[in-house]
Image (cartoon, coloured by chain):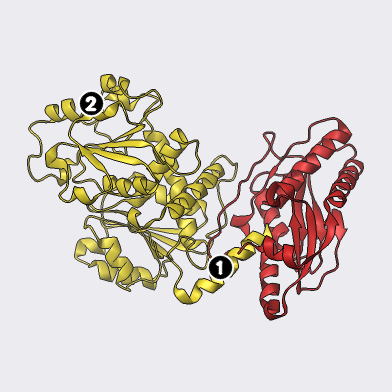
Chain colours: A red, B yellow
């Protein structure tokens, strides 16, 4: 049932563990450059894998700037626009750093950017928590096919895909290994796979 | 648990833990500047109360409003029920108004079950206490409170020893708690005068004792029940004073409880009867905490019943839907 097993069987690796580490280091440097020192940055990961990515980015930023960077998680389940298309979903943890987000530069972190609906939900969720100075978006993989006017400020890898393909991100914290796999949905379940994937991203 | 929440006995362990976990996240909304989620926007929740209640009705109302549902409060007093309208006609009226969920409290045991199975209404039915039968959301909030105090707010209650003391006969809270707590792995002991132990208690998943002092020292939580004088049509015990002396919880008895043990009460309390003021006001007494947790639990129940196209709690998928729902589960995995 777990989709990760399916991805692992049929996937072609796009990024390996060292690539992911390099990509995150680059994004961290970009953040410091664009935020002029990253003094007021708060990293919020979107569960599940975005949270781990936010944690890793925070470590890298701390290395570069020499200061701890607050990071947390932002669950978007209750703000999704497709809640009524499936059974009610289990919630994930929202963990906002103690100093909050008011007046700060919040960087949302997610693994894959696809339709953009997850980010739309995250912006709504963020609005109920506080009023950041600005909000930016960092993603490990941008696979295209946006359905909303949303773009990422920091992209690990632009990955042109067809809607039939699946993108699977694996992280040590959750899956035991680091990697990004690009897989083709099996012919028989092509349509199903596409729907599944599009919902998945929302 | 189908589409409805009628009895705590319908919940599997996984259902119960899912509700408690969801409530744990809902509780965090209360700490935010904006205590509101958009999740149930456009859904209507009717509070149908045929019996007096402060806590439960307000709690359900607050829960529904925090999830952005529209709330209609209906109390039998001052409604057509006092003119003789039947439950069926009331239900049909609510259905015509488009209620997505009906939260019902009724003096007749089984009224919520009737409402859920009669086909009068299409929405979900949540039992908010029926007669002397069940009060599942109270049991859930009690379990939630115990899990926070005794089990670090995670998992189930396996191995915890919980004692429920008092008027078990008239208590829907006790019955729901016995079912739910045993589902969650706790060992439940009922303590009551023999006259206040219901017939058929032998089939309940719990022990029965008539000696409070014997079980106090090995209890992780002691739940005191209110003596429901309004339901008593006969003499169940000689005098109130004797009841208080043998089955009431006072400071001396509380001192014999283990260090970590908590005192619970579903409210409203009869101070001086089943619980002394000293105990009720002590930091070991969780009454106020229970009320606060009630809102989180009811948000979780409403979300899990109404939040999706179908309820998230097991046993609810008709056979034809099962493939699709597995599919959706996979999507959730994949997304994150």
Q: Residue at x 52, y 68 (%)?
A: B309
Q: Is residue B30 left or right of residue B165?
A: right
**Which residue extends farthest right?**
A33
In x, y percent, where is residue A56?
A: 78, 42
**Which residue extends farthest bottom?**
A188
| Circle nearer the N terminus (2, 1) | 2
Q: Is residue B41 left or right of residue A33?
A: left
Which quadrant of the figure contains the N terminus of chain A?
bottom right
Q: Quadrant of residue A25?
A: top right
Number of labels in the image equals: 2
Q: Label 1 crowding class (10 Å Cα cut-off): few <14, some 14-19, many 20+?
A: few
In x, y percent, where is residue B105?
A: 30, 55
**Which residue extends farthest front?**
A9
In x, y percent, where is residue B270?
A: 24, 33
Label drawn at residue B326: 1
Q: Which chain does the numbered disc 1 sit on? A: B
Residue under label 2, please give it: B213
In x, y percent, where is residue A126?
A: 68, 49
Q: Which chain does the numbered disc 2 sit on? A: B
């Amino acid at each position: 049932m777990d989709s990760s097993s399916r991805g692992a069987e049929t996937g072609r690796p796009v990024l390996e563990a060292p690539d992911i580490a390099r990509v995150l280091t680059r994004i961290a440097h970009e953040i410091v450059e664009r935020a002029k020192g990253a003094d007021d940055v708060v990293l919020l990961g979107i569960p599940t894998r975005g949270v781990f990515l936010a944690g890793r980015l925070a470590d890298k930023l701390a290395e570069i700037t020499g200061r701890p960077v607050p990071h947390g998680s932002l669950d978007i389940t209750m703000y999704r626009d497709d809640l009524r298309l499936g059974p009610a979903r289990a919630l994930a943890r929202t963990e906002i750093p103690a100093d909050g987000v008011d007046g700060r530069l919040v960087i949302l972190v997610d693994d894959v950017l696809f339709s953009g609906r997850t980010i739309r939900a995250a912006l709504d969720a963020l609005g109920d928590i506080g009023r950041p100075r600005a909000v930016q978006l960092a993603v490990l993989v941008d696979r295209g096919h946006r359905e909303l006017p949303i773009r990422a400020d920091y992209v690990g890898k632009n990955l042109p895909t067809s809607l039939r393909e699946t993108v699977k991100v694996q992280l040590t914290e959750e899956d035991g290994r680091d990697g990004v796999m690009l897989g083709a949905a099996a012919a028989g379940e092509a349509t199903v796979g596409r729907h599944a994937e599009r919902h998945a991203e929302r | 648990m189908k589409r409805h929440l009628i009895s705590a006995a319908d919940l599997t362990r996984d259902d119960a833990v899912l509700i408690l976990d969801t409530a744990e996240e809902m509780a965090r909304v209360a700490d935010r500047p904006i205590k509101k989620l958009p999740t149930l926007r456009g859904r209507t929740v009717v509070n149908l109360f045929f019996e007096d209640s402060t806590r439960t009705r307000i709690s359900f109302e607050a829960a529904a409003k925090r999830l952005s549902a529209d709330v209609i409060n209906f109390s039998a007093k001052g409604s057509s029920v006092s003119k003789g309208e039947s439950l069926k006609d009331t239900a049909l009226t609510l259905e015509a108004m488009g209620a997505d969920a009906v939260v019902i409290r009724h003096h007749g045991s089984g009224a919520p079950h009737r409402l859920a199975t009669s086909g009068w209404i299409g929405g979900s039915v949540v039992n908010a206490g029926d007669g002397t039968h069940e009060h599942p959301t109270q049991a859930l909030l009690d379990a939630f409170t115990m899990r926070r105090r005794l089990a670090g707010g995670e998992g189930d209650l396996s191995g915890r020893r919980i004692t429920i003391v008092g008027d078990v006969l008239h208590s829907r809270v006790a019955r729901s708690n016995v079912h739910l707590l045993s589902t969650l792995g706790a060992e439940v002991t009922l303590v009551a005068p023999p006259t206040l132990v219901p017939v058929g208690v032998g089939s309940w998943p719990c022990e029965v004792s008539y000696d409070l002092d014997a079980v106090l020292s090995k209890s992780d939580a002691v739940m005191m029940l209110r003596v429901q004088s309004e339901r008593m049509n006969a003499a169940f015990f000689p005098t109130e004073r004797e009841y208080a002396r043998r089955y009431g919880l006072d400071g001396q008895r509380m001192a014999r409880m283990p260090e970590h043990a908590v005192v619970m009460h579903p409210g409203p309390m009869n101070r001086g009867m089943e619980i002394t003021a000293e105990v009720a006001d002590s930091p070991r007494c969780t009454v106020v905490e229970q009320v606060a947790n009630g809102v989180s639990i009811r948000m979780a129940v409403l979300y899990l019943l109404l939040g999706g196209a179908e309820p998230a709690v097991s046993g609810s998928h008709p056979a034809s839907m099962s493939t699709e729902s597995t599919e959706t589960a996979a999507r959730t995995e994949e997304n994150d």
